[in-house]
Amino acid sequence: MATIESLFRKRLVICVGAGGVGKTTTAAALALAGALRRRRTAVITVDPARRLKDALGLDGLSMEPQSVAVDSVHFDALALDTKRTFDALIERFAPNPAVSARILANRLYQELSNELAGSAEYMAMEKLHELLHLHRYQVLVVDTPPSAHARDLLAAPNRVTNLLASRAVSLLQAPAALLSGAPSSVARVALFPLLKALQRWTGLHLLHDLADLAAGFEHMIEGFHTRAEEVSRLLRAPSTAFVLVTTPEPHTVETAISFHRELTDGGFPVAGIVANRVLAFPRLDEETVPTAAWDERLRSKLLRNYRELQELSQRDRRTLRKLQGETGAPLLAVVPAVTVAPTTLAGLERFARLLL
């Protein structure tokens, strides 16, 4: 039977879920929970909120592992820097330092490397690939970007590689082809002034920079492609576990069901579900509550509030039953709703122990 403990026998644990469900906090807490079980763990966060940085006691999370100590245990935390990871990838796959320097200095590359669709997802996969091959950690927990669909995350390596290898990029190596390839003389006449106008507006030597950037990538496509295939195999390996993080609200449960379907259809191993912010108010026998001495208005208001919380608790139970029924995935942990997100290491430790 899958349990939270079983996650700590995996090398790679990937938390996926909709935005706002506490995925980043859950990932950090899982890393701490692993450390409490005496495993060498690290968490990669993508966009840690200020309160999580405060909780970790780290003002400036960076690409370099930073140790987070809790009592007698510790784990490492890293924050993904898409631009720096992309730069490192260019330096690794460039055929020589001159090509690497040319791409890194290209003004279009500097603008696009942070904004290219899928680049954050690609770099998250790239960084975990690098860390796994260092064999520094027994368990690596990854907090994924808040992608609208799991497929956006998992297809990112191939999508970026395919883009770099596409005919569109090949055309950019010879900017004149943009004009010669226009379907008519009218189109060529219209395209030329448009490109010149873009050049004036952006202040860039647009055609030259495009050609230079495309040519620089020409000799690196194979390296990117090989890396994307390795990451794809890694994500489907038995040593990898995907964890669906969700709250019990109906719309986030529907998203979790959709994520599960996409993951299983793609052959990715889903270990189970962590349900966050779950209400669990039991039925109350109002006759037995010793409220006789209370002010009647206060008593009435408190009991009404409790009944509302009880109804929400019933809704949470129903939606989680639906989630389990439609996915068949085990409920690894249920974290009760708390009014304050962890803002200290002590708070993060309480969260971690709720997972165990």
Image (cartoon, rainbow, N blue to C red):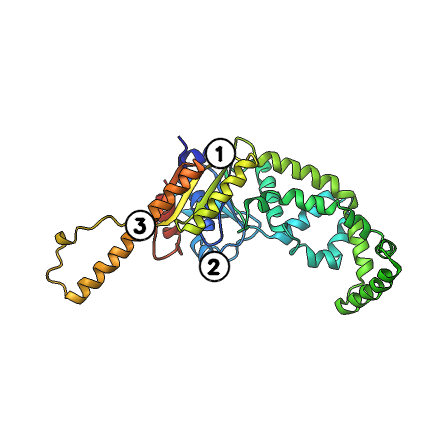
Mark 3 vs 1: CB contact within 8 A = no
Q: Hey, what amino acid is under mark 2?
A: Arg
Rendered image quadrant of residue 200: bottom right
Asked whether, in this view, residue 186 is left or right of residue 271, the answer is right
Q: Earlier in the sequence, mark 2 or mark 1?
A: 1
Rendered image quadrant of residue 162: top right
Residue 5 spot, x, y in % from top left: 40, 35
Residue 119 spot, x, y in % from top left: 64, 50
Q: Earlier in the sequence, mark 3 or mark 2?
A: 2
Mark 3 vs 2: CB contact within 8 A = no
Q: Nearer the viewer, mark 3 or mark 2?
A: 3
**CA separation, marks 2 and 1?**
29 Å
Dot 3: element:
helix
Residue 21 disc label: none
Mark 2 vs 1: CB contact within 8 A = no
Residue at the image point whose x is 82% and y is 51% from the top: 173
Classed neighbour count for the residue bearing mark 1: other residues with Cα under 10 Å, few (<14), some (14–19), many (≥20): some
Location of mark 3 (residue): 313
Location of mark 1 (residue): 10
Q: Is residue 292 visible?
A: yes
Asked whether, in this view, residue 188 is left or right of residue 270, the answer is right
